[in-house]
Image: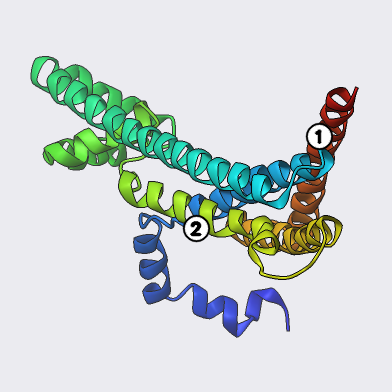
């Protein structure tokens, strides 16, 4: 059956489905914050573990360094996300005040801006004038149109606190994985613990990459392998640095 007559495709284009999809387009998903928080948490914590292993540090020191890094970097990343998201909202509010002032001071000039915006989209004549009249008749719609069309701003921003919490939670949960083998009350030696941590972290890298692929609508497999490769490269670099520093200390 061709895509043109596919029942699934037809269902996606019913008036009800279209209305629901358009309404959902303004809802914010915090999956992106969670995925990238998890990526950073896993990479940075395992880099500490790999560096400690390369330097031959005891398990207790690895745990201390790993936990300090996990909490400090997780908090830092969450705070940065909070500030950045809040700044986006403040930019929109500043733009709104600016456009409100322009409409008060130069209403005809602002109407002309609306006219030219929609003329550039291919509207003209009586239809263009109807569009201008409809938009400028409602002040809020007028301002919103100027924000999106003239300033290129997104009207609805994610909640800064929710974005920060999503980032921190993902960072800590995923970042704990490389440290779990060091908390286990076993008689494993340092090499076995590091090997177990490496395997668990590799699985986490791949899993986070899969989730990222779904989040950004890329091939999940390709995204998983890419994240795994990036994580392995970061871990290898940290391990080499640890070995080098250990050799310097030994000398």
In this view, the residue farthest toward the left is 104
Q: Position of residue 246 (x, y in %)?
A: 84, 31
Q: For this view, does 56 lie left or right of residue 109?
A: right
Q: Quadrant of residue 145?
A: top left
Earlier along the polypeptide chain: callout 1 or callout 2? 2
Mark 1 neighbour density, 10 Å: few (under 14) some (14–19) many (20 or more): many
> Residue placed at 60% from the left, 53% from the top?
175
In the rendered view of the protein, which quadrant contains the N terminus? bottom right
Looking at the rendered image, the disc whose residue lies closer to the viewer, 1 or 2, is 1
Q: Quadrant of residue 88?
A: top left
Viewer-closest of 98 and 30:
30
**Residue highlighted by disc 2:** 31
Viewer-closest of 180 and 77:
180
Vertical arrangement, residue 244 with respect to residue 51, above or below: above
| Element marked by disc 2 | helix
In this rendering, the count of numbered labels is 2
Q: Position of residue 183 (x, y in %)?
A: 63, 62
Residue 159 visible? The answer is no
Q: For this view, does 86 lie left or right of residue 135?
A: right
**Residue highlighted by disc 1:** 242
Mark 2 neighbour density, 10 Å: few (under 14) some (14–19) many (20 or more): some
Residue 162 visible? The answer is yes
Q: Quadrant of residue 174?
A: bottom right
> Residue placed at 20% from the left, 21% from the top?
98
Viewer-closest of 77 and 147:
77
- Between the residue at mark 1 and the residue at mark 2, the CA separation in whole angstroms equals 34 Å
């Amino acid at each position: 059956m061709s895509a043109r007559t596919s029942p699934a495709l037809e269902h996606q284009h019913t008036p009800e489905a279209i209305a629901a999809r358009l309404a959902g387009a303004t809802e914010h998903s915090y999956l992106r914050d969670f995925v990238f928080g998890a990526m950073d948490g896993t990479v940075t914590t395992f880099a500490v573990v790999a560096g400690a292993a390369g330097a031959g540090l005891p398990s207790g020191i690895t745990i201390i360094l790993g936990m300090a890094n996990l909490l400090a970097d997780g908090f830092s990343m969450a705070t940065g996300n909070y500030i950045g998201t809040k700044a986006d909202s403040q930019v929109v509010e500043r733009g709104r005040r600016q456009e409100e002032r322009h409409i008060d001071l130069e209403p005809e000039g602002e109407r002309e801006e609306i006219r030219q915006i929609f003329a550039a989209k291919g509207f003209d004549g009586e239809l263009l004038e109807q569009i201008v009249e409809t938009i400028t008749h409602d002040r809020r719609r007028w301002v919103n149109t100027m924000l999106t069309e003239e300033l290129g701003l997104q009207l609805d921003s994610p909640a800064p606190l929710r974005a920060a919490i999503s980032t921190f939670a993902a960072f800590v949960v995923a970042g704990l994985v490389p440290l779990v083998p060091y908390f286990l009350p076993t008689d494993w030696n340092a090499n076995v613990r590091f090997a177990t941590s490496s395997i668990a972290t590799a699985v986490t890298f791949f899993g986070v990459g899969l989730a990222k692929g779904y989040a950004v609508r890329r091939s999940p497999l390709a995204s998983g392998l890419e994240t795994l490769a990036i994580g392995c490269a970061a871990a290898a670099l940290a391990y080499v640095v640890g070995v080098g520093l250990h050799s310097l200390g030994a000398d």
